[in-house]
Image (cartoon, helix red, strand yellow):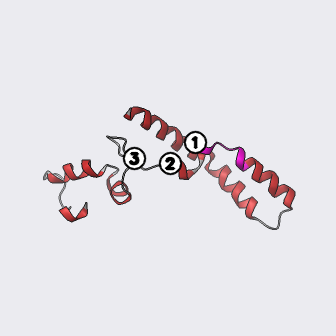
């Protein structure tokens, strides 16, 4: 089942990068009050027709090895799940991390 989560996550990340510029432009034009309202409505409609998985809020930080959702502080530093990082830091390979960093 972990591989299914990885596939879904990679698909979402691909869609985010594919539609990122288009989504930003549509949002910026929708917020621009200098444009006429009918044009803003059309752009808002186009924004709503983009795939939902192309939104950045759908992307979740996941562990590389277990595909489990990660805590924010651990995942940003190591791209790993908390338990995997703690096991790795107990070995002398990873130095500089104390027991309080969990």
Quarter of the image containing the C terminus? bottom left
At label 1, counting other C-alpha atoms closer than 10 Å, the crowd grade (few under 14, some 14-19, many 20 or more) is some
Determine the image quadrant of residue 24. bottom right
**Label 2 residue SS:** loop
Q: Main secondary structure of the magenta part?
A: helix
Dots 2, 3 in contact, CB < 8 A: no
Instruction: Find residue 75 and report its horizontal and vertical position in percent.
Output: 36, 54
For the N terminus, the image quarter is top left
Pick out the residue farthest to the front: 1
Res. 98 in view: no
Q: Disc 3 marks which residue? A: 62
Label 3 element class = loop
Residue 22: x %, y % from top left: 68, 50
Cα–Cα gap, marks 3 and 1: 17 Å
Q: Residue at x 72, y 54 (%)?
A: 26
Task: Give the label on residue 15, or none.
Answer: 1
Q: Is residue 38 left or right of residue 56?
A: right
> What's the magenta region?
47-52
Q: Which mark is residue 59?
A: 2
Q: Is residue 51 magenta?
A: yes
Q: Residue at x 35, y 50 (%)?
A: 79
Residue shown at the point (55%, 51%) measured from the top left? 56
The circle on residue 43 is: none
Q: Secondary structure at mark 1?
A: helix
Q: Which label sits in the foreground, 2 or 1?
A: 2
């Amino acid at each position: 089942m972990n591989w299914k989560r990885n596939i879904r996550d990679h698909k979402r990340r691909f869609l985010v990068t594919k539609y990122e510029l288009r989504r930003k432009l549509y949002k910026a034009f929708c917020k621009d009050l200098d444009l006429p309202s009918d044009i803003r409505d059309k752009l808002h409609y186009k924004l709503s027709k983009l795939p939902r998985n192309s939104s950045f809020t759908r992307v979740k930080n996941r562990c590389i090895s277990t595909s489990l959702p990660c805590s924010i502080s651990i995942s940003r530093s190591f791209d790993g799940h908390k338990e995997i990082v703690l096991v790795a830091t107990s070995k002398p390979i990873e130095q500089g991390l104390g027991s309080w960093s969990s």
